[in-house]
Amino acid sequence: METLALEPRAAGVSEASRGRSGQGRLAGKVALITGGARGQGEAEARLFAQHGAHVYICDVLEEEGEKLAAELRGSGLQADFRFLDVTDAEQWSRTVAHIDAGAGRLDVLINNAGINVRHQLTDTTSEEWDRIVAVNTKGQMLGMQACAPLMKRSGNGSIINIGSTAGIMGHPVAAYSASKWAVRGLTKAAAMELASSGIRVNAMHPGVVETPMVDAGSRVFAELRSLTPLGRAAQPSEMASAALFLASDEASFITGIDLAVDGGFSELAAYGEVWKRLNTAL
């Protein structure tokens, strides 16, 4: 939902060794992660590679993506970078063809790429609306269309669409909220359609996370953190851990769900604030 720049955490020796030994939770699997060059996508790429996956880091941030892939390969892990504008169907086709030619399979897709323009409804231009919906919603649809055939040939798969708490409760930024509510409907439709092929499709909804999308010193960040019942913002690694579960065989009977990874914000914040005020008054 909201985000802050942090230095990436170095992979622990035990984690990296796990990936090299092929004993991780994603051993032998191939994963495509959009928006994978930084923030939550970067954390997912690191963790998935540490758990044995061959990770394809896809982003428009070419320099950062190439650097991350090289770093992971330098640690003995499997990672490649591909430039990908998620709004371009032809680029999706080329990316999947490249993965098919190189790895011969695809097991996990994380539709992580997303943007936001924080304007009120009456201040949002048509161009801004179209761009937000194109990246946040159409990009996920194009990704599933492109990846599903290779996943079917691979035998099964897990698709994780990254939404937001802005898509499961009221939110003041109309375009962003609308795009994330749409992710939920898209996820459920895809989950029904692809279930017979053994492909699971789930949506994960972050709350306030410390990534490059937000200024941690801003008032909005402070307010969101204050209203989060666990009393803090999440780290990107915590989002990656939830995604790892959904991607792994441990979640083999889970599809079509909305998983809020938000410290209780969407379910508890309102009454939690009332409770806090009452106890403070006492």
Image (tube, rainbow, N blue to C red):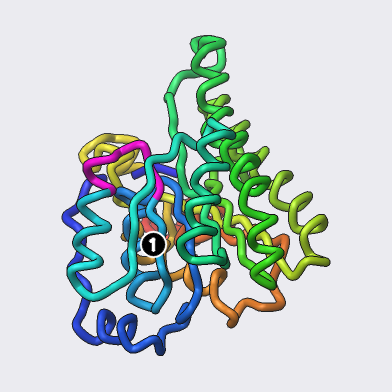
Seen from the viewer's position, the closer of residues 228 and 192 is 192
Image x and y of residue 194, in percent: 77, 59
> Taking the image as drawn, is residue 274 in sight?
no
Image x and y of residue 250, in percent: 59, 82
Image x and y of residue 66, in percent: 25, 49
Q: Is residue 64 magenta?
A: yes
- In percent of the image, x 47 and y 49: which residue is there? 112
Specify the quadrant of the image occupied by residue 222: top left
- In percent of the image, x 45 and y 34: which residue is there? 85
Please identify the quadrant where the N terminus is shown.
Answer: top left
Image x and y of residue 65, in percent: 28, 48
> Taking the image as drawn, is residue 72 in sight?
yes
Say whether residue 234 is left or right of residue 25. left
Specify the quadrant of the image occupied by residue 259: bottom right
Q: Is residue 89 magenta?
A: no
Q: Which residue is mark 1?
A: 44
Looking at the rendered structure, the kind of residue marked 1 is: Glu
Q: How many marks?
A: 1
- In percent of the image, x 65 and y 63: which residue is there? 151
Residue at the farthest front position: 101
Depicted 133 relative to depicted 246: above or below = above
- In percent of the image, x 65 and y 41: which residue is there? 141
Say whether residue 62 is left or right of residue 167. left
- Circle 1: is it few (<14), some (14-19), or many (20+) Cα within 10 Å? many
Depicted 204 relative to depicted 126: above or below = below
Tag 1's secondary structure?
helix
Depicted 142 relative to depicted 191: above or below = above
Q: Magenta span covers which residues?
A: 58-65
